[in-house]
Amino acid sequence: MAGSGGLAGGAGGNQGTAGGPGAALRASRAPLLFAVLVLGAYCLCALPARCPPAGRVPAPAPARAEPPRASRSPGAHGLPVASGSGRRRFPQALIVGVKKGGTRALLEFLRLHPDIRALGSEPHFFDRCYERGLAWYRSLMPRTLDGQITLEKTPSYFVTREAPRRIHSMSPATKLIVVVRNPVTRAISDYAQTLSKTPGLPSFGALAFRRGLGPVDTAWSAVRIGLYAQHLDNWLRYFPLSRFLFVSGERLVSDPAGELGRVQDFLGLRRVVTDKHFYFNATKGFPCLKKAQGSGRPRCLGKSKGRPHPRVPEAVVQRLRAFYRPFNLKFYQMTGQDFGWD
């Protein structure tokens, strides 16, 4: 027993002697391993998600029975509600971009219009689920009546190379809405969203530039999405400029009724959604919808909208502004609109 104890003690003594440098080496590697794990998690978040299983795609709500057009009953915010059995159709209009530009706000505002029926979720058909076929895509759409417009929103379409060709194959008459925003602000907002899901990310500047403040890393999706002119070049191979409406994300905040008026005109609809439906929420820094009759409170977008941005050094912001400037100017020329980002 004594011998045993001596042997165990000897082994323990040797381990203790050798454990000092080993423990130090393990300790020095810990920050590196943590950084690798964080970057790995970020890369997984940044990868395009797979097409969801068919059973997980929410079925569109059936349309309600419609009284005669002249006697439509008032719905939310005093607007008439379109209803009826109708039928499922391919969208006549798509909100194709861009992420963190204001697409969710635009969709929610447009859903006030009685002649618009919109799919609430993003189906990602033309970028992730195309192999499921057009019949599957149409089965997701809400039922519409004659004279109503079917609308869907998936912001990643604008930066998906195959999307224009696929949409053109469905219908070359599709109307395309692109909500754009200052690409520097958009990139920071994109980063803020990812940071909320993956705490511990490297700084915005570390991801936006290679080697400190070296070349801009256009492989990073938060930067790449803002190259609007390059993406639009791809779309113009399939659709004329007349099929597009470019909505200012900034004006959607400062003058939502004005931008909504342009969208309703573009869709060939009467201007039903007006300034009487909005008020500005100073806390969120975003317009909200006034409460409907019988509703307890006004309706604002979710808590993720108007999320505070992390502080980014001014030198990083100025470098990115300089990088985007020529792309912005080309985009202004292509669209015939000056968005005032420079």
Image (cartoon, helix red, strand yellow):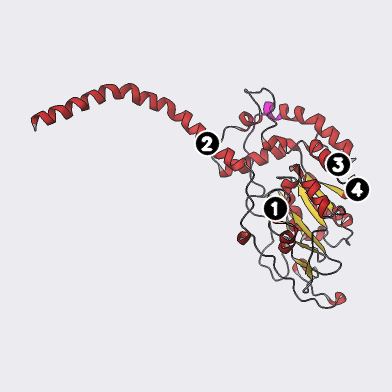
Of the residues tagged 3 and 2, which is closer to the observer?
3
Q: Nearer the viewer, mark 1 or mark 2?
A: 1
Circle 2 residues within 10 Å: few <14, some 14–19, many ≥20: some
- Report the amino acid beneath label 3: Arg
Indicate whether residue 183 is drawn in magenta.
no
Amino acid carrying mark 4 in the image = Ser
Residue 302, percent across and down? 64, 54
Are the residues tagged 3 and 2 within 8 Å (C-beta)? Answer: no
Q: Is residue 204 left or right of residue 145?
A: left
- Label annotation for residue 237: 3
Q: Secondary structure at mark 3?
A: loop
Residue 130 percent across, percent down from the top left: 71, 52
* Circle 1/circle 4 CB separation < 8 Å: no
Q: Secondary structure at mark 1?
A: helix
The amino acid at mark 1 is Glu
- The magenta-colored residue range is 303-317
* 102 to the left or right of 57: right
Q: Which mark is residue 131?
A: 1
Q: Main secondary structure of the magenta part?
A: loop
Q: Which residue is mark 4?
A: 242
Q: Give the residue pinned by disc 2.
A: 38
Snapshot quadrant of residue 173: bottom right
**In 3D space, how far apart are the residues under numbered discs 3 and 2 (Cα atoms)?**
39 Å
Percent coordinates x, y for residue 38 in the rendering: 52, 36
**Snapshot quadrant of residue 66:** bottom right
